[in-house]
Amino acid sequence: MTKQEFSQHIRDNQNTMYALAYGIVKNQEDAADVVQDTILKAYTSLESLRNPAQFKPWIMRIVHNTAIAFLRRRRETEDLEEQYDLSAPEPGMDRETKMTVWEAVNGLKLPYRLVLILFYYEGCSVSQIASITATPETAVRQQLSRGRRLLAGLLNREDFFV
């Protein structure tokens, strides 16, 4: 893969990379740092990409691993409590409903938050999520199912809407 092709793939996937990083670290500046670190790691290990057609799952796995490593380092020093403001996946929802759903998703713990973001917000398939998170597909399906139940439980709580 040439430098120009790599740069184009990065441009094509930059929003998804940032959204995944932000969904994990929940901070704009930290997400930008994770994406920058990811780009550097990806470029220096470009020879490990066996199939250029699989660039997106490959780079998203690097984003995931870099963000998780960042959280592990950061967890020692401070607690993460910021809100994430992406739109909800349903285009027919009003802004208030989208924000309510997003706040509920944001309230979930990893890995449920991560698989829901990748599946509904980023449009990744179960197999892509399995590849990104290095988790078996059956576990991803279970996490999606459990995440949906947890999300429904949060949205049905009366005190959630306060």
Image (cartoon, rainbow, N blue to C red):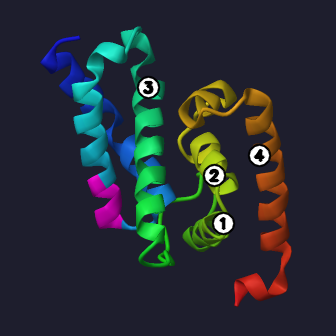
Please name the amino acid that badge 4 sits on: Gln
Residue highlighted by disc 2: 90
Residue 55 among magenta residues? no
Please name the amino acid that badge 2 sits on: Glu
Please name the amino acid that badge 3 sits on: Trp
Q: CA distance from mark 3 to mark 2?
A: 27 Å
Please name the amino acid that badge 1 sits on: Val
Instruction: From this view, report whether residue 147 is shown above or below residue 9.
Output: below
Q: Within 10 angstroms of label 1, few (less than 14), some, or many (20 or more) residues?
A: many
Disc 1 is placed on an element classified as: helix
Q: Residue at x 66, y 52 (%)?
A: 111
Q: CA distance from mark 1 to mark 4?
A: 18 Å
**Taking 120 as reference, is 13 left or right?**
left
Q: Residue at x 40, y 57 (%)?
A: 70
Q: Quadrant of the C terminus?
A: bottom right
Residue highlighted by disc 4: 143
Q: CA distance from mark 1 to mark 2?
A: 10 Å
Of labels 1 and 2, earlier in sequence is: 2
| Observer-nearest of 81 and 153 | 81
Q: Within 10 angstroms of label 4, few (less than 14), some, or many (20 or more) residues?
A: some
Of labels 1 and 4, earlier in sequence is: 1
Label of residue 101 in the image: 1
Q: Are marks 1 and 2 in contact (CB under 8 Å)?
A: yes
